[in-house]
Amino acid sequence: MKIKTLIPVVVLVVAFAFAGCNSSEETEPGPEETEPGPVDMTLSVLKTGWYESGHTNYEPVTYNPLEVGDVVYEDDYYEIVIESVTEDMIILNVDGALIEPNSDGTINLRADPIEEIELAAGESIEIVSQTMDAGIQLKIAFE
């Protein structure tokens, strides 16, 4: 009589053990499966347009929160998009002939255009259009 009672108990224990293993894998996604959300940091872009007879200062534009894919600057010639962002660092993808100016403010017309900008929290960068007759200057800060 004891063997007849023991067999169903063992079968139930084994069945619950396997059922518990499978259910936990299906209900909780791993960290690699979760989508990142917006980051509560600020990116500011200050644009100055320059031309032969003067310049135009624009109001700074700020973005907060920040998310991958956000376009933070765009005009007919240039586009800057957030490629990656955390609270510690932002990576921007740059499309167009933008470069860092020389230390004396001049523009190297032979420099390779910037394709990507990495800024740590608290850092900023100045980039300019690679032109001689008219263009833009952007000051980008990640805070």
Image (tube, rainbow, N blue to C red):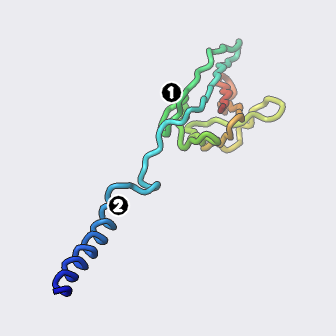
Q: Position of residue 137 (x, y in %)?
A: 67, 26
Question: Does residue 90 appear to the left or right of 126 in the view shown?
Answer: left
- The amino acid type, in three-letter code, at marker 1 is Asp
Residue 94's disc is none
Of the image marks 2 and 1, the number of the one nearer the N terminus: 2
Q: Residue furthest right?
A: 104
**Residue 39 falls in image quadrant:** top right
Disc 1 element: loop
Q: Which mark is residue 76?
A: 1
Nearer the observer, 2 or 76: 2
Q: Nearer the viewer, residue 130 or 11?
A: 11
Quarter that holds the N terminus: bottom left
Marks 2 and 1 close (CB-CB < 8 Å): no
- Specify whether 58 is left or right of 76: right
Q: Is residue 120 above or below residue 57?
A: below
Which residue has dot 2 on it? 24
Residue at 57% of width from left, 39% of height from top? 94
SS label for mark 2: helix
Quadrant position of residue 104 = top right
x, y percent for residue 86? 58, 42
Distance from the alpha carbon under mark 2 to that under mark 1? 51 Å
The amino acid sitting under disc 2 is Ser
Q: Quadrant of the C terminus?
A: top right
* Residue mark closest to the camera, 2 vs 1: 2
- Across and down, in percent, residue 34 comes to 43, 49
